[in-house]
Amino acid sequence: MSDGPLAGVRVLDVSTILAGPLCCQILGDFGADVIKIEHPTAGDSMRGHGKSKDGHPLWWKEISRNKRTLGLSLSAPEGAALLLRLAEQADVLVENFRPGTLERWGVGPEQLHRANPGLVIARITGFGQTGPYAGRAGFGTLAEAMSGFAHLTGAEDGPPTLPAFGLADSICGIAASSAVLMALWHRDRSGGAGQVIDLSLLEPIMAAVGPGPTVYDQLGIVEHRHGNRSTNNAPRNTYRTSDGAWVAVSTSAQAIAERVLRLVGHPKVIDEPWFRTGAGRAAHADELDAYVGAWIGARTRDEVSRAFTEAGAAVAPVYDARDIVSDPHVRQTGMITEVDDPDLGPLRMHNVMWRMSATPGRIRFTGRAAGADTDSLLIDELGCDPAEVADLRARDIVS
């Protein structure tokens, strides 16, 4: 079975919560040999995030899948020296310490590139390596606030709303995996030189929020919250069905909007001049929501889904985790897959993010125990003396 297009690429994951680990998870899913480096006594704080079963953190099982683990204190000179030796054999290093931290430990880009000129170094921080905010603590919540996301999310008369999950981190992690591949491509076609990637949590989610700064620059307009509605089209909202479920309707395309209004029994409104554009329909969202909401509210979720599908209109149920794992499309396409875990047995989790016909990725193993691969990495691969490793372990420099 193919390990994926990145087989033979070695990645050092020197990052924690959440963007860096997700970047490295994606690289590992598609064949990279990822070595997860974490503090030898405290461990990676990702181990304490989310729910656990029988003492085993469930999020760790997914975010650290396909990663070998090594407990290593980078702040100790001996630990920093081992990182440089590992970097000699690596293609990529991903880190998310505050700017200047690696430099203070003697393992900044200058030292890393001296050890391995071809190394790609991805540095993920809240606000980047330069600028007045570079030294600030950076978390996804701050990026969600400063990107415009929170300002645009929530009820029109309510407070700005933050997501209940790591949105900014996740967007950044996916972006980071793309940046790493660009740097590897450049290295391998341009003479073997690595480079440093400076990526903040803020910029990718700013791009996802949309062209607000451009609109303000050119028109002086600042958009505001509209709940589940859109200023670009209508009807676009969530609606409750007769059996207490919720569905989401989108009419971004004119033809879809026309099909929805015919379906819900109001074809005459299609002839109104304002109905001909998304902005015109958005200005009449109260009227359109009333038509669609009344029709949906008189029917069950299954009835609504069946009718919309037959009409060629766009609708989707609002799912929770239980709905996701039981959905027939999710199951048949393998979006959620089952992996054998040595601690928990069969374990369902998200599959690799995309399918590749020639070099598909796969989940080779789930997140491992702290320091599970320390001896094999240091003794078998780096050639360290077992007595030296035992001494480092006794001094909490490795685990």
Image (spheres, rainbow, N blue to C red):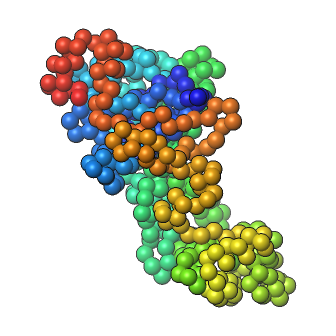
Q: Horizontal placement of 71 versus 387: left or right?
A: right
As rendered, which of 140 and 314 lies closer to the eye? 314
Quadrant containing the C terminus in the rendered view: top left
- Residue 119, compared with residue 178, is above or below; it is above
Q: Looking at this rendering, what residue extends furthest in the right direction?
A: 271
Image quadrant containing the N terminus: top right
* Residue 209: x %, y % from top left: 56, 59
Judge left or right: residue 343 versus residue 243: left
Q: Residue at x 20, y 36 (%)?
A: 41
Q: Is residue 278 visible?
A: no
The residue located at (50%, 69%) in the rendering is 153
Residue most toward the left?
394
Q: Quadrant of residue 129?
A: top left
Tag count in the figure? 0
For image coordinates 41% across by 16% down, the residue present is 88
Q: Nearer the viewer, residue 255 or 129?
A: 255
Expressed as whole percent of the image width and height from the top left, the position of residue 172 reads: 49, 47
The quadrant where residue 288 appears: bottom right
Residue 320 lies, in percent from the top left, at 49, 66
Q: Which is nearer the eye, 375 or 266?
A: 375
x then y, percent, for residue 30: 55, 34
Q: Considering depth in this image, is 196 or 319 the residue closer to the camera?
A: 319
- The reply to whether residue 151 is in sight is yes
Rendered view: 110 above or below 306: above
Query: Is residue 370 rendered to the left or right of residue 235?
Result: left
Q: Look at 59% across and 54% down and name the residue there.
A: 331
